[in-house]
Amino acid sequence: MSHPPRIDLAPDYSISRLLKGDWQLAGGDGGVDRAAAIADMAAYYEAGITTFDCADIYTGVEELIGDFRREHLARHGKDSLSLLRVHTKFVPDLATLAQIDRRQVAQTIDRSLQRLGVERLDLVQFHWWDYGVPRYVEVAHWLQELQRAGKIELLGGTNFDTVRVRELVDADVPLRSMQVQYSLLDQRPQPAPYCAQSGIQLLCYGSVAGGFLSERWLRASEPQEPFENRSLVKYKLIIDDFGGWDLFQQLLQQLQKVAQRHGVSIPTVAMRWVLQQPQVAGVIVGVRRGDHLADHLRVLSLQLDAADLATLDTVLAQRQPPSGDVYAVERDIEGRHGRVMKYDLNKAPH
């Protein structure tokens, strides 16, 4: 196995600095080749990308990772997955927030345990859709009870803003991480002084903006709806907020200069930029097929220097100010961003 750099989220709990994101394996994105998906998991793990990200709302993904675990252990022995960390999420549906109870929380966690085939979940990342239903501290405490019962090792959050992170920490919820959208286009998580003060590290998704930050879109005409998938709809809105298509093209041109300087691709530079930001522990890379593994490994060996950062800053200095705190615009159900979201992907166990 390769040994790329790792980082500690807690004492005796280290992760790879790139995390294999598995949301693209969810059934909602079309047919998934089970054998190929499991082979890709093995390839990433053997290459040293040993932390996988999933969620209870990613249809079929926890089960796929569970199948990978069982097959790998049967083939290579009980110690062959000693570095594997699987980060899942607890995402109650928007429609259930006012009614969800302790029993339903426990049943959802038990369901993830069963799907993954483990006795304890490594990290559960808690997401809450609507702050207008102010029960997130109460529900977080129920997750803590399950942590004390040995069913969860670490607790983290997903897309909580600064005010609510502070509220959870003040209520003694031991958050170790916060998963947020973070890219050259979307810098809402920056700065993160409260996370630094509280020892909360960032796990970042969206670093290549659904593929927009790539050679494919360099010098391309501005796309119009309908888009190929919902992810492109979501990230095109981020580009609009960043400053529009012309400014985005300027950014791609500067990214190309940096990429050519290092002999890598534009997405590699974009991911590395996020990885070098303060408080960032890891970047989650979406993997539907394993043909990008070599590029992903280059993210870990690349180091952007002052000249590289200055090249990108010539465009970043012109961007529009970020709109609100982390995930603020996505929570507006009637807003441009909110209309793209799906708020009820989970079915609470009964």
Image: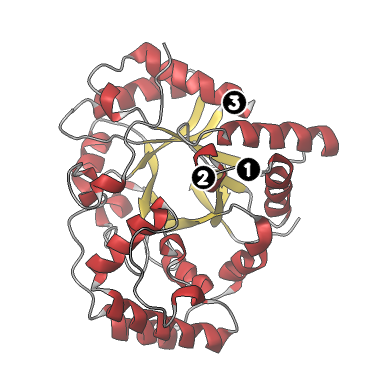
CA neighbours of label 3 inside 10 A, class few (<14), some (14 to 19), many (20+): some
Q: Position of residue 262 (x, y in %)?
A: 57, 84
CA neighbours of label 2 inside 10 A, class few (<14), some (14 to 19), many (20+): few
- Does the image show residue 187? no
Give the Cα separation between the discs numbered 3 and 1.
17 Å
Label ID, residue 115: 3
Kind of residue at badge 3 = Arg
**Does the residue at mark 3 contact the one at mark 2 (Cβ under 8 Å)?**
no
Residue 135 drawn above or below residue 166: above
Kind of residue at badge 1 = Val
- The residue that label 1 is drawn on is 32
Kind of residue at badge 2 = Asp
Q: Is residue 33 left or right of residue 23?
A: right
The quarter in which the N terminus is drawn is bottom right
- Residue 227 figure quarter: bottom left
**Does the residue at mark 1 contact the one at mark 2 (Cβ under 8 Å)?**
yes
Label ID, residue 29: 2
Q: Position of residue 53 (x, y in %)?
A: 52, 44
| Residue appearing at x 60%, y 72% in the figure | 301
| Residue appearing at x 57%, y 44% in the figure | 25
| Mark 3 element type | helix
Give the Cα separation between the discs numbered 3 and 2.
20 Å
